[in-house]
Each structure stands twice: as structure tokens, then as C-alpha cells.
Image: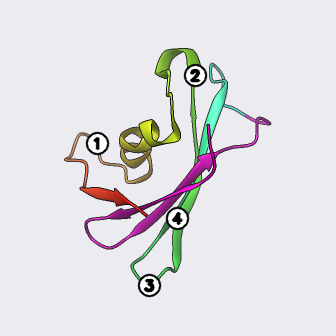
Amino acid sequence: MSDAIWIVLEDGRIMTIQGAEPDFFAEGCDASIDYTLFDQFCEEIDGGQMDYCAEEKKYGHIRDVVPDILEFALDLNGARTPNYYFI
């Protein structure tokens, strides 16, 4: 995975994502992505780590993670993934 990327969501919130340090993963996982979610005024409102199995997901680039990390971080539960763009 590469360096951090910045995403702007359709409602103005901003998210950064980057590969996490390979220290701690949930059982059955061997990789993780760190994320931080900011409001439209750049105040941090959430953050965390999404663990995953690299062999199962086969992300080629950190941008490939975006739909999954949005589902995870925003707790969409099957709701529509918001529109977004990269900055």
C-alpha cells in the first residue's frame, strides 16, 4: 500500500486513509488500514482501523479500499455508499 490519501465525501466530511503498522490485527487478518474522519470544518470526529485478509481482498492500490472502508467507518449497513472524490 502507498502513502495516505484524502477523500472528500458528498456531505463535506473528509477522510484520510493509509496502511497501518503491521503490529496488531484481528484473528484471521493479516493487514489493516487506518482511517480518520473529519467534519467539513476539519475537526476530527472518528478514526480507527479496519483489519482484513490481504489474500481475500487483493487490494492492488490503497484507492481500492475506499468502498470497504466507507462501509466500515460510516456503518452503512447496506445503505448507499456516498459519492466521494480524492484530493
Q: Nearer the viewer, mark 4 or mark 2?
A: 2
State the separation of the CA atoms marked 3 and 2: 34 Å
Sequence-earlier tag: 4 or 3? 3
Type of amino acid at the residue the image marks with label 1: Asn
Q: Residue at x 27, y 70 (%)?
A: 11
The stretch drawn in magenta includes residue 80: no
Which x, y percent locates residue 81? 25, 48
Type of amino acid at the residue the image marks with label 2: Ala
Q: Nearer the viewer, mark 4 or mark 3?
A: 3
Sequence-earlier tag: 3 or 1? 3
The outermost residue toward the right is 23
Q: Helix or strand or loop: what does disc 2 sit on?
A: helix
Q: Helix or strand or loop: what does disc 3 sit on?
A: loop
Q: Which residue is under mark 2? A: 54
State the separation of the CA atoms marked 4 and 3: 14 Å
Q: Residue at x 25, y 65 (%)?
A: 10
Residue 72 shown left or right of residue 1 in the figure: left
Q: Helix or strand or loop: what does disc 4 sit on?
A: strand
Residue 46 image label: 4
Sequence-earlier tag: 3 or 2? 3
Which x, y percent locates residue 79? 21, 46
| Label 1 Cα neighbours within 10 Å, binned few <14 / some 14-19 / many ≥20 | few
Q: Which residues are magenta?
A: 1-24
| Count of numbered labels shown in the rendering | 4
Q: Which residue is under mark 3? A: 41
Q: Residue 53 falls in which quadrant of the image?
A: top right
Type of amino acid at the residue the image marks with label 3: Phe
State the separation of the CA atoms marked 4 and 1: 17 Å
